[in-house]
Amino acid sequence: MQAVTLLAVSKTFGPLAVREAVAAGQQAFGENYVQEALDKIAALADLRAQVQWHLIGPLQSNKTRVVAETFDWVHSVDRLKTAQRLSQQRPAHLAPLQVCLQVNISGEDSKSGVAPAELPELARAVAALPGLRLRGLMAIPEPAGDFEHQRRPHRALREWLEALRSQGLALDTLSMGMSADMEAAIAEGATIVRVGTAIFGGRAAKGSGPAPTVECGSSS
Ligand SMILES: *Cc1c(COP(=O)(O)O)cnc(C)c1O
């Protein structure tokens, strides 16, 4: 079976939760919101060399510079314009930014992600950008209850990766699977699973107050 990297999705959890996970041996962290991530990365500057930061949430054009300067990976690239900006803005002293293309695998109107039909053209263009290294594909499929239904979109994403590889692109990454469907994703070849709830516990609903930080046994 393929090696699977566990990406700990630390969105809404504070720096202390990340620090504890690092102490337990975790190295890769996923964040959805750029500003929240920047605050956390700054608070954890002493750990910077030990930790890889992955942006997994939507990326607006006005945030590309700070993302190119700060993150190790971006999983959510779905437009050439964003990729070009990230490539131009990646500082020369850093390794190329590792990127995945987010694919709208379930075909929902509301979701981000490139339409599968447009994927080959986007992949070829992004693979040619000097400041980026295109590693593979990412998807957030519609939730599905049972294992067999969960497998289908993951299988479709794997087949797209295989198609791109057969066209000569050197891709090695399938970023798919979250707390609820990671087993199905791994069965279909996931190489990175993005897991939040199953590691850090439940998140407060968005907009219901400040982000919770981890309890550390000091409640009175
Ligand atoms: C929040 C999030 C995850 C983690 O979800 P869990 O269900 O908490 O494991 C994974 N990927 C993306 C893109 C997310 O936004």
Image (cartoon, rainbow, N blue to C red):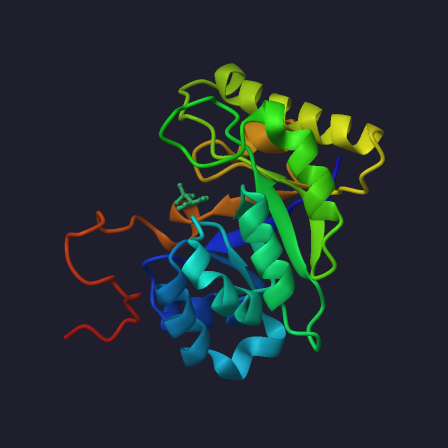
Residue nearer the viewer, 199 or 157: 157
Q: Is residue 145 above or below residue 57?
A: above
Q: Find ligand 1 in the image and state its quadrant.
A: top left
Residue 85, position in %: x, y? 57, 58
Judged from this view, the residue extending furthest toward the bottom is 46
Residue 166, position in %: x, y? 83, 28
Q: Quadrant of the N terminus?
A: top right
Query: Measuring 58% from the left and 60% from the top, which residue is drawn there?
Result: 86
Residue 129, position in %: x, y? 72, 54
Judged from this view, the residue extending furthest toward the top is 148
Task: Classify residue 124 by image quadrant.
Answer: top right
Residue nearer the viewer, 112 or 79: 79
Query: Measuring 68% from the left and 46% from the top, which residue is drawn there?
Result: 126
Q: Is residue 104 visible?
A: yes
Task: Classify residue 51 by image quadrant.
Answer: bottom right
Residue nearer the viewer, 100 or 20: 100
Residue 181, position in %: x, y? 48, 31
Query: Measuring 66% from the left and 44% from the top, which residue is drawn there?
Result: 4
Q: Is residue 135 visible?
A: no
Q: Is residue 94 above or below residue 207?
A: below
For residue 70, side relative to residue 130 (left or right): left
Q: Quadrant of the C terminus?
A: bottom left
